[in-house]
Image (cartoon, helix red, strand yellow):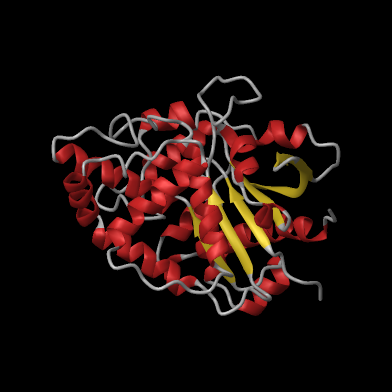
């Protein structure tokens, strides 16, 4: 049997079914995932927890009468759109940490998170914003985020395997642009920009599974899944409607696939070279995945068969594509 898929980029508009796909895969025995999906035991990386903590940092700043750092308001987009690159830099660093010697836990998780956010933003071309705060202000902000930053750090440490041998790293994120935008999307919006910010270590081994829904359906499912009492949840968070229109009103995946010079591949320009990534679309325009948010005891055989079969077909195509 061939080696499992090494690195799977799981991409889609918000609420398209990415996290439900991850949950479904995690519900299956390892041997069935290997046989049907060409996946080893998975290691998960996701940029949403950082988006949530950026919004939490802004909420704490606003509550103390200070300006927001990252977002224009609770229901609007990034002040500096280069923060899409900040999120990719955080993904790169979480990925690199999987094979680096374990670091000693920091003395203060909130302070460590603020430094990580500034480091990643600086790598994306943004001047350090959190280090520029008055020391008492920064200290208070760090303390307010200590518990949530610590929970995220603990999750990352717990997910780190002894080895990546035989495993599949799944990296999830969503990108897009304003409703009605023409292609190509202007950087730093869209997948072309964010894929180009991924590290060579990721791009050299990655394949792309795109969960395909329309922007209109993405907005409908986003409203349906949103639980205001659980804003940090991977499965139940809601993206503000204005952000859905301004940042996810369209995406450039079809454009990227269409400009490739090889069928079943997409070309990514990054680090002074062209990478060719195998790509497949999992058609979720007619909803195959929302049932996964329910208790598994309520999943019907028809629901499972529909999802499993379509997912197996898409992943088989990826596993068979040679670079």
Q: In which quarter of the image is residue 224?
A: top left
Q: Where does residue 233 sit, x and y in percent of width and height?
A: 35, 55
Check the image and report above or below for 309 versus 1.
above
The answer to whether residue 6 is visible is yes
Left or right of 4? Residue 305 is: left
- Which residue is drawn at the image coordinates 25% and 60% (left, top)? 146
Left or right of 257? Residue 243 is: left
- Which residue is drawn at the image coordinates 51% and 60% (left, top)? 94
Q: Quadrant of residue 79?
A: top left
Check the image and report above or below for 114 versus 273.
below
- Which residue is drawn at the image coordinates 67% and 57% (left, top)? 201
Quadrant for the N terminus, please: bottom right
- Which residue is drawn at the image coordinates 62% and 48% (left, top)? 198
The answer to whether residue 14 is visible is no
Q: How many marks?
A: 0
Q: Where does residue 121 sit, x and y in percent of width and height?
A: 45, 42
- Front-most of residues 166 and 218: 166
- Front-most of residues 209 and 111: 111
Left or right of 243? Residue 171 is: right
Check the image and report above or below for 280 versus 307.
above
Q: Where does residue 135 sit, x and y in percent of width and height?
A: 21, 46
Q: Where does residue 70 sit, x and y in percent of width and height?
A: 34, 37
Check the image and report above or below for 266 versus 91.
above
Q: Residue furthest left?
A: 64
């Amino acid at each position: 049997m061939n080696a499992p898929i090494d690195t799977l980029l799981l991409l889609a508009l918000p609420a398209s079914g990415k996290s439900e796909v991850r949950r479904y895969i995690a519900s299956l025995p390892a041997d069935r995932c290997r046989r049907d999906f060409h996946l080893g035991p998975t290691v998960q990386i996701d940029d949403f927890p950082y988006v949530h903590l950026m919004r939490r940092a802004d909420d704490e700043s606003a509550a103390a009468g200070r300006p927001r750092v990252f977002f224009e308001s609770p229901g609007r987009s990034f002040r500096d759109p280069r923060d899409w690159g900040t999120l990719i830099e955080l993904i790169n660093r979480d990925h690199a940490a999987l094979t680096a010697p374990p670091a000693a836990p920091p003395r203060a998780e909130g302070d460590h998170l603020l430094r990580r956010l500034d480091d990643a933003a600086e790598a994306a071309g943004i001047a350090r914003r959190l280090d520029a705060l008055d020391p008492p202000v920064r200290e208070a902000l760090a303390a307010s985020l200590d518990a949530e930053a610590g929970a995220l750090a603990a999750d990352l440490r717990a997910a780190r395997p002894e080895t990546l041998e035989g495993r599949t790293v799944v990296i999830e994120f969503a990108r897009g642009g304003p409703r009605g935008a023409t292609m190509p999307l202007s950087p730093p919006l869209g997948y072309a920009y964010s894929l180009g910010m991924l590290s060579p270590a990721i791009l050299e081994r990655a394949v792309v599974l795109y969960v395909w829904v329309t922007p209109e359906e993405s907005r409908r499912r986003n409203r349906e899944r949103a639980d205001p009492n659980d804003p940090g949840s991977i499965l139940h968070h809601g993206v503000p409607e204005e952000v859905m229109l301004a940042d996810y009103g369209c995406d450039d995946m079809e454009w990227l696939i269409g400009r490739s010079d090889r069928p079943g591949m997409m070309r990514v320009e990054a680090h002074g070279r062209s990478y060719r990534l195998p790509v497949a679309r999992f058609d979720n325009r007619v909803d195959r995945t929302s049932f996964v948010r329910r208790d598994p005891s309520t999943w019907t055989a028809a629901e499972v068969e529909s999802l499993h079969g379509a997912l197996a077909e898409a992943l088989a195509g990826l596993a068979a594509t040679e670079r």
